[in-house]
């Protein structure tokens, strides 16, 4: 008993050293597993031969993928979410980018108030944002619906756009614009030919972020949507009686599309750096 | 990754001083740039908050329909609401604090591994951190309900090793709610942590080693202090939405795990008791602002936007 134990000690010590060297990597792998468990479930259950309730595994099928609009309302809710997302993205990106340029490139009175008005919506819990906006709509006798969803989404997206674009613009060298103006570009030309193209990646990132925030928002939407269904609201409401597997199909498809966009962006950026 | 990096960086990085281009004729331009966006925020954020403030001190009109309230400046609505829902209030902050600590414990090593150990896989791993965002937040929370269900793998494993009795479950418990909160806000914690860790110059840690600091001391005295802005930004980005969340408690909990968000939601929609919902909203917001201010003061990072 003792002999093999003695022989095993160095191996054990080696194992301990290997563990302590790779501990953080092992930890990271476990953390990633934690992040991906529910996604794996979502993807797997899009192939479930679910019948009425998609809670238990009942066998593999591709029918849900062949007929993603098979469940009532699911595609209607998706289309509403896409429409809201696009409108909110365009509006909030334009408004937020303008504020970001003002903050990064101009000197003006009221900077503190502006910063506060940008910061507060990000620091306010969604349930308060949603409840307050609905209170105002009710006071004004406005019935919540599609328009109020868009209004709400633009409101909470602006701050994130400002922060994202401002970070990019602040990292640009202002001397580039000054050089353009030294070469007789007027202010507008310098902006359009120099600043805007350089800031474009930041604006694009902000637009993506705004779309993601809008598309996935539930709490504020739930307060201000009346009886209009967005995709997250559809999923939440149907959770009580069982979510149709088509919702998993749409969730999985959105996941793949978004991943594709990000990876394509990466590859393009790398190609441009090389070329 | 620069685009996503900038998203993360911007949450952690403080704003530098404005770069003045200083030309006399440009005084009006900033105001024209600011006006539409700030007007939007004034009309759809600031005014609604005031409307909520006004509603929070209204009382029911006797004999009128359900949902009709009149302004009576009844400040007692606040202590009344707090007394009635102190449990849900306390729970919201308790769960949010727990979830924030757990997310920090999971997210810090994760961000550290991506920043220092990932090599050329760094960008891919960052994409994987934000990948959960790409499936719907509600769908993921419901997936957790399946993972933690009695027939799911976690409960079966825990029962097999007798950590969980045969009649005990994980769904509809406070454990499930905290796990869901931790999960849903983990990327918000990890990204700013990564952004600040990535900026730590490895030569500083090497220098600490040259000065006879061991690995742990080097981390504690060099890396950790330099990553504090990320810790502050990450904890705020996790704690604030977690304290106001009601989706996790509604989907993963039971009535005795309800958080203040659940009460605000049900007061609004099921009971049509707008003043109580408004008073609770205000107290939630005030409590979060006070905690955030204290926290930022203590951690000494005042520039957040």
Image (cartoon, coloured by chain):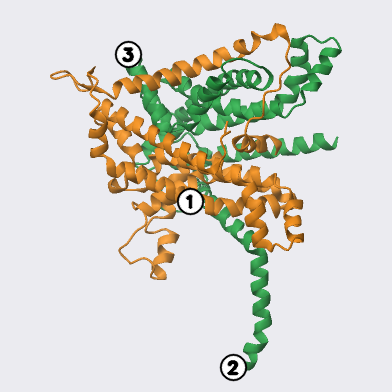
Distance of label 1 from label 3 (alpha carbons): 43 Å
A3 relative to B138, above or below: below
Distance of label 2 from label 3 (alpha carbons): 85 Å
Q: Earlier in the sequence, mark 2 or mark 3?
A: 2
Whether labels 1 and 2 belong to a single chain: the reply is no
Tag 3, which chain? A
Give the color of chain A as drawn. green
Q: Does residue B78 appear to the left or right of A42 in the view shown? A: left
Q: Residue at x 83, y 16 (%)?
A: A180
Q: Which residue is mark 3?
A: A141
Quarter of the picture holding the N terminus of chain B:
top right
A154 relative to A260, above or below: above
Quarter of the picture holding the C terminus of chain B:
top right
Q: Residue at x 32, y 66 (%)?
A: B166
Name the disc covering residue A258, or none: none
Distance of label 1 from label 2 (alpha carbons): 45 Å
Q: Position of residue B205 (x, y in %)?
A: 72, 55
Q: Which picture quadrant has residue B301?
A: top right
Tag 2, which chain? A
Q: Secondary structure at mark 1?
A: helix
- Label 2, residues with CA under 10 Å away: few <14, some 14-19, many ≥20: few
Q: Which residue is mark 2?
A: A1
Q: Which residue is mark 1?
A: B101
């Amino acid at each position: 008993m003792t002999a093999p134990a003695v022989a095993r000690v160095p191996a054990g010590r080696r194992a301990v050293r290997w563990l302590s060297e790779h501990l953080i990597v092992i930890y990271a792998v476990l953390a990633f597993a934690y992040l991906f468990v529910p996604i794996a479930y979502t993807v797997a259950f899009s192939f479930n031969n679910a019948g009425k309730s998609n809670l238990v595994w009942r066998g593999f099928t591709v029918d849900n993928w062949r007929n993603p609009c098979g469940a009532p309302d699911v595609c209607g809710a998706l289309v509403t979410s896409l429409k809201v997302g696009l409108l909110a993205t365009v509006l909030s990106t334009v408004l937020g980018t303008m504020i970001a340029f003002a903050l990064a490139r101009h000197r003006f009175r009221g900077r503190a108030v502006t910063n506060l008005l940008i910061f507060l919506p990000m620091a306010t819990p969604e349930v308060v944002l949603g409840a307050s906006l609905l209170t105002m709509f009710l006071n004004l006798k406005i019935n919540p619906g599609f328009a109020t969803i868009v209004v709400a989404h633009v409101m909470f997206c602006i701050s994130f756009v400002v922060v994202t674009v401002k970070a990019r613009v602040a990292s640009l060298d202002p001397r580039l614009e000054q050089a353009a103006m030294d070469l007789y570009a007027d202010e507008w030309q310098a902006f359009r030919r120099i600043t805007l193209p350089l800031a474009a990646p930041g604006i694009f990132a902000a637009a993506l972020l705004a779309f993601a925030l809008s598309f996935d928002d539930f709490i504020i939407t739930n307060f201000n949507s009346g009886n209009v269904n967005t995709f997250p609201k559809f999923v939440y409401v149907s959770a009580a009686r069982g979510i149709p597997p088509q919702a998993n199909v749409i969730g999985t498809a959105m996941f793949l599309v978004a991943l594709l966009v990000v990876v394509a962006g990466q590859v393009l950026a790398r190609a441009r750096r090389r070329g | 990754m620069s685009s996503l990096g900038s998203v993360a960086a911007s949450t952690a990085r403080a704003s530098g001083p404005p770069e003045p281009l200083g030309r006399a004729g440009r005084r009006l331009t900033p105001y024209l740039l600011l006006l539409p966006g700030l007007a939007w925020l004034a009309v759809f954020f600031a005014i609604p908050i005031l409307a909520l403030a006004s509603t929070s001190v209204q009382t029911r009109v006797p004999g009128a329909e359900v949902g009709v309230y009149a302004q009576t400046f009844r400040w007692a609505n606040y202590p009344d609401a707090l007394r009635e829902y102190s449990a849900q209030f306390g729970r919201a902050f308790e769960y949010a604090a727990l979830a924030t600590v757990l997310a920090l414990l999971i997210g810090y090593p994760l961000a550290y591994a991506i920043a220092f150990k990932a090599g050329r896989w760094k960008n891919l791993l960052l994409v994987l951190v934000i990948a959960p965002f790409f499936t719907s937040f509600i769908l993921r929370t419901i997936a957790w309900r399946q993972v933690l269900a009695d027939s799911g793998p976690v409960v079966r494993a825990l029962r097999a090793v007798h950590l969980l009795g045969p009649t005990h479950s994980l769904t509809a418990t406070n454990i499930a709610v905290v796990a869901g909160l931790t999960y849903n806000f983990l990327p918000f914690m990890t990204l700013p942590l990564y952004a600040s860790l990535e900026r730590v110059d490895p030569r500083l840690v090497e220098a600490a080693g040259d000065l006879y600091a061991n690995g742990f001391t080097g981390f504690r005295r060099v890396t950790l202090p330099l990553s504090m802005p990320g810790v502050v930004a990450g904890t705020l980005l996790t704690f604030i939405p977690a304290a106001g969340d009601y989706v996790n408690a509604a989907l993963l909990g039971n009535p005795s795990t309800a958080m203040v968000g659940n009460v605000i939601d049900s007061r609004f929609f099921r009971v049509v008791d707008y003043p109580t919902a408004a008073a609770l909203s205000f107290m939630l917001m005030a409590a979060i602002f006070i905690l955030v201010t204290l926290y930022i003061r203590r951690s000494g990072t005042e520039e957040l936007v």
